[in-house]
Image (cartoon, rainbow, N blue to C red):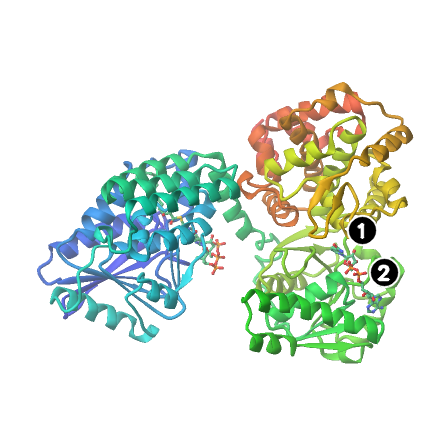
Amino acid sequence: MDSRTKGKTVMEVGGDGVAVITLINPPVNSLSFDVLYNLKSNYEEALSRNDVKAIVITGAKGKFSGGFDISGFGEIQKGTRKEPKVGYISIDIITDLLEAARKPSVAAIDGLALGGGLELSMACHARISTPGAQLGLPELQLGVIPGFGGTQRLPRLVGLTKALEMILTSKPVRAEEGHSLGLIDAVVPSAELLTTARRWALDIVERRKPWISSLLKTDKLPPLGEAREILKFARGQTRKQAPNMKHPLMCLDALEMGIVSGPRAGLEKEAEVGSQVISLDTTKGLIHVFFSQRGTAKVPGVTDGGLVPRKIKKVAIIGGGLMGSGIATALILSNYPVILKEVNEKFLEAGIGRVKANLQSRVRKGSMSKEKFEKTMSLLKGSLDYESFRDVDMVIEAVIENISLKQQIFADLEKYCPQHCILASNTSTIDLNKIGERTKSQDRIVGAHFFSPAHVMPLLEIVRTNHTSAQVIVDLLDVGKKIKKTPVVVGNCTGFAVNRMFFPYTQAAMFLVERGADPYLIDMAISKFGMPMGPFRLCDLVGFGVAIATATQFIENFPERTYKSMIIPLMQEDKRAGEATRKGFYLYDDKRKAKPDPELKKYIEKARSISGGNVDPKLVKLSEKEIIEMTFFPVVNEACRVFAEGIAVKAADLDIAAIMGMGFPPYRGGIMFWADSMGSKYIYSRLDEWSKTYGDFFKPCAFLAERASKGAPLSAPVEQARSRL
Ligand SMILES: CCCCCCCCCCC[C@H](O)CC(=O)SCCNC(=O)CCNC(=O)[C@H](O)C(C)(C)COP(=O)(O)OP(=O)(O)OC[C@H]1O[C@@H](n2cnc3c(N)ncnc32)[C@H](O)[C@@H]1OP(=O)(O)O
Ligand SMILES: NC(=O)c1ccc[n+]([C@@H]2O[C@H](COP(=O)([O-])OP(=O)(O)OC[C@H]3O[C@@H](n4cnc5c(N)ncnc54)[C@H](O)[C@@H]3O)[C@@H](O)[C@H]2O)c1
């Protein structure tokens, strides 16, 4: 393959008169422009050759195609590639050349056909798939729309309601479901895929099988009035679920056009909208997230050294509380045998009970069978001592946040566990060097910081000290992948990346409220911005005990930039400690529904009198934009410090950490990406102004000041920022 080109197709014509065109672009045979243009020329050749009666399209190495090459969107966004004529690929190539051809085509789908891959197959005249293959249109998840005819062909193949479900949720279906939906014509074992597809194609030629153009099908479409009602409902739901995004509604416009005015008009609308969405900010953010998420597992100096992850056959967890039970659940769900250690029978039973409850909730929701439940639970064994730790490959400590207890446990682990065993801690704040102080095993000590609930939250912060070996990090990255977490490797410091970046967020909110802002308006503005909830609702959810413990760590470690508000401690004194006590910043009813509490004012006033601050008329009347800036720019400031200190290797890792650890809206691209969309100069100037009025809590850090002075993006690596001078 030419090193300048990205992928290709190859065509082989058999003695049976079938031309097999294979998509080749490892690792997922994505449809780059090179692949698409090659496909076009192979197709033209096949149509012009007298020895070709029919065509089969397939993908190399067990994968049909993962869709359009996503990096192509980036090239168009950056202007490094000229956009093809609108509709050139979807109408000129896929519809007029391929679907409308005089010779029939069959898609032979192995493994997966996603996005443009599935769309290409839907333009063929039949689809044969291997069992379990993933079929879907996940484009909305990337901020784009199905742009190779998917908005028109999918509803015609599976019906409008199912097509809407597949497109709006971005969730794929398996081949077997695809078969029952009418998306797939036959499911056959991998070894029979090509022969079946060839035979099917010849059967179409010989009229033994129907020659179906998906675009011309109407039998699965509801009557117009009903279709309009279905689309209206879908629009309403979309507005509610994705209020800050335009592209899902634009996608519905294309779908509707096809149903109301016919598939050709629908294709034209899809092409027009497809081209428009590429330049939306939300699309840029989501595409950045796609690549950044895959980039977190690439750690310079660690994963580029050829190290192979060792096999982790058995894991032990110490502490079966909230976190330990969640971590155990995540591990057994991915088939790791787990030993759970607790202090006594009662706590052990409670810990195992929590794991059971986590799994039972899946059984209740129908996502786990009873058999699978029993099998998964059988991987968990309880223990009250370390005897069974003699053959474990990894231990994750998740006992209460107490330094001397953790130090004792690690000293014990060194005695009982084999030499190769990884010694991990789930501590949220304690210095890992201190935890391992009483051992000689510093090279195998690492942080495995899960987020609560650990079996649900997607992020795993892997915390390395200066002594942690690269092998241990590679091993933990592999475990993270197997338990379906996105791992982010960070350095050792108070709060690591996520808690450290987001601590100022709650602090800023407390500051604003003490100076007269309305807490409920702050929560509302932040929810509208796209966070799952505002800072006050979050404090209630986490509980004031945890909030105070975390604040104490930050006050001790970063006193110069911590705002010491008394609101939470004052409420805690009155035994209102958040949602668990049904009272915090909000009041909670039996169904855990939150409502504002007029009594909150009393605590705010008392805290204000303790801090000596006054109500500031400007802060009483903050606009939503100002609320967002005053709460998130301090987060950006701290993220800059984390980046400058090398706690995170790449700014994109902080983007993923913010999205997956804190629920920062992915369509804003993550904290650093979002900050760069506003510019370092602007953020610096706002923080600088507030720090002069309100104190050092807002003071921009040296890194931010430097980048602002150069007009350099915050996310640029140091070298790149210099070169912009
Ligand atoms: C006229 C208008 C403008 C013109 C533009 C042209 C028109 C454009 C119209 C677009 C039409 C089309 O409808 C749009 C699309 O098809 S968008 C793509 C849709 N597909 C997806 O969203 C799938 C994305 N990929 C995945 O979900 C997964 O990668 C997977 C395929 C399920 C495989 O998962 P897994 O095995 O876990 O592997 P990884 O996720 O780690 O991926 C491995 C590497 O492959 C890279 N990758 C994957 N998919 C793509 C892709 N579609 N494009 C480019 N690269 C892809 C991924 O980044 C990994 O790379 P690294 O190894 O380097 O990390
Ligand atoms: N709660 C969170 O949201 C959260 C999030 C991330 C990390 N963490 C960290 O995870 C750790 C555990 O937190 P948690 O919320 O699960 O606490 P928890 O109080 O719910 O559970 C701790 C468990 O450890 C057990 N334990 C204590 N000493 C033990 C010993 N010697 N051997 C075995 N078990 C022992 C206790 O009996 C208790 O069941 C802490 O370090 C915490 O900072 C907590």
Image coordinates for residue 64, horizontal then vertical, percent: 34, 61
Dot 1, crowdedness within 10 Å: few (<14), some or many (≥20)?
some
Quadrant location, the N terminus: bottom left
The Cα–Cα distance between marks 1 and 2, rounded to whole angstroms, is: 38 Å
Q: Residue at x 42, y 39 (%)?
A: 249
Secondary structure at badge 2 equals loop
What amino acid is labelled 2 in the image? Glu
What amino acid is labelled 1 in the image? Thr
Q: Is residue 20 above or below residue 345?
A: above
Sequence-earlier tag: 1 or 2: 2
Residue highlighted by disc 2: 437
For residue 215, say whether it is visible.
yes
Image coordinates for residue 75, horizontal then vertical, percent: 41, 39
Image coordinates for residue 479, horizontal then vertical, percent: 62, 65
Left or right, 631 with reference to 251:
right
Image coordinates for residue 186, horizontal then vertical, percent: 29, 69
Residue sitting nearer the eye, 562 or 180 = 180
Q: Residue at x 43, y 45 (%)?
A: 234
Q: Residue at x 81, y 56 (%)?
A: 433
Left or right, 549 with reference to 216:
right
Residue highlighted by disc 1: 581
Confirm or deny contact between disc 1 and disc 2 (CB under 8 A). Answer: no
Secondary structure at badge 1 equals helix
Quadrant in the rendering for residue 699: top right
Residue sitting nearer the eye, 691 or 490 = 691
Left or right, 170 with reference to 352:
left
Residue sitting nearer the eye, 691 or 213 = 213
